[in-house]
Image (cartoon, rainbow, N blue to C red):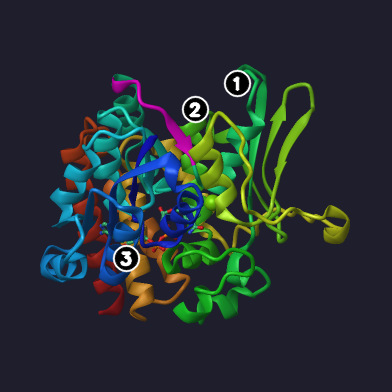
Amino acid sequence: MKRVSIFGATGSIGQNTIDLIRRAPSEYKVVAVTGGANIAQLAADAIELNAEIAVTAYADRLNDLRAALAGSPVEAAAGEAAIVEAASRPVDWVMSAIIGYAGLAPGIAALKQGATLALANKESLVTAGDLVLRTAKASGARLLPVDSEHSAVFQALVGENMAGVEKITITASGGAFRDWSLEDMACATPEQAATHPNWDMGQRITIDSASMFNKALEVIETKEFFSVDPQQIEVLVHPESLVHAIVSYRDAGMMAHVGPADMRHAIGYALHWPERRHLPVERLDLAKVGQLNFNAPDPARYPALRLAWGVMELGGMAGCIFNAAKETALDAFIDHRIGFLDMATVVEKTLTKLSSDNGLIRAEMTLDTVKETDQLARITAKEIMQYRKG
Ligand code: NAD
Ligand code: MG
């Protein structure tokens, strides 16, 4: 039996992971499941999957979780430290699907104990790529991509040598505002930004798709995951969201990965790797699809992409600052405190301010220094937003 844990089990990726595990219950022993405020969902899944432990991120919800688990053998725990403790429990495979910076510490704990880490939490690689990769190397743990584009690249690289790779293209749907003018984007509301044309995902990543901050994170994730130069990475807008990535080789051959916009394909690939097993995912009928379109993203409407290349050039802690400032600006946008296009301005100003401190950017990367930098970037982004208001 494969021992598995699911971090961020109540979210969009977590629920899709559970959907696959639920179909073959005899093959898996579920150790830990974690969630946030949705205690009813967390408890129901933990009981159904017969998990060892269920953990909510919120320390003050422990009693609610205990009550929801009453009468079942599932252990209850709460708070950040409890999530990291749960990640240290030995398993074969961990789904890292907490959203945001909060996914980093449990991911590191899972890698330390040698589990294969199925990484949906792209923020870990953006924030602390060097630390994540070093930790995996030290314990011999394997990292598998779950982000659809990175799973696609990974699949297009099977049997190939990185020396033959010329370019990696990841595609972007263009999000909710693909066809909007810059003027309209300036007035866009969080509700409008949280509607995705092709993918059904959590609210935060859906808004990040509309701003292309999600793609900016993925560009950095590509650099970290596949150790390529920033100049070897390209983003193309592909409205159909069916070609997820293309690897271009030096003999002019291009390997494209094509599949339906259903995260269970990438999750299932990481769950069963290196095997391919049947997955309950729609089969594409390309004759019906008819056309696949690609175009270059408009730099004026998507400043987040330009920022990603700046972050890769800076290296070190720049990714941590970028992600923290982005998360802070996104909170403010969701709360209607700043406009849609202000997010990129806040992130750029935070980066400009903090990147002048070479000691900060080049600091040795540990969980503690990353946490300090993350907090500093959040405070700085908040100060910048305060100043804008005043
Ligand atoms: P979501 O918002 O639907 O779910 C997030 C999960 O994390 C929930 O279980 C929530 O309870 C938990 N969580 C939130 N804040 C937490 C905190 N501070 N501490 C601990 N747990 C916390 O998010 P999602 O869309 O499933 O995305 C999860 C991750 O996967 C993200 O990193 C995202 O970028 C990545 N991803 C998602 C998709 C997708 O289709 N949804 C695709 C590719 C990559
Ligand atoms: Mg993606």
Q: Residue at x 62, y 35 (%)?
A: 276
Q: Residue under circle 3?
A: 44
| Left or right placement of residue 213 versus residue 3 in this view | right
Determine crowd level at label 2: few under 14, some 14-19, many 20+ residues with C-alpha closer than 10 A. Answer: few
Say what amino acid the circle numbered 1 marks: Met
Q: Residue under circle 1?
A: 162
User: On the image, which quarter does residue 131 sit in?
Assistant: top left
The answer to whether residue 259 of the structure is visible from this angle is yes
Could you say where residue 253 lies in the image, as x and y percent from the top left?
Answer: 79, 28
Is the residue under label 1 in contact with that under label 2 (CB below 8 Å)?
yes
Above/below status of 252 relative to 296: above
Q: Quadrant of the N terminus?
A: top left
Viewer-side residue, 259 vs 178: 259
Mark earlier in primary sequence (2, 1): 1
Viewer-side residue, 354 vs 54: 54
Residue range corresponding to the magenta coloring: 139-145
Which dot marks residue 192?
none
Could you say where residue 311 lies in the image, as x and y percent from the top left?
Answer: 42, 43
Could you say where residue 270 lies in the image, as x and y percent from the top left?
Answer: 51, 39
Q: Residue under circle 2?
A: 227
Viewer-side residue, 164 vs 308: 164
Say what amino acid the circle numbered 2 marks: Ser
Disc 2 and disc 3: Cα gap in Å? 40 Å
Residue 344 among those drawn in magenta:
no
Q: Residue at x 45, y 65 (%)?
A: 202
Is the residue under label 3 in contact with that under label 1 (CB below 8 Å)?
no
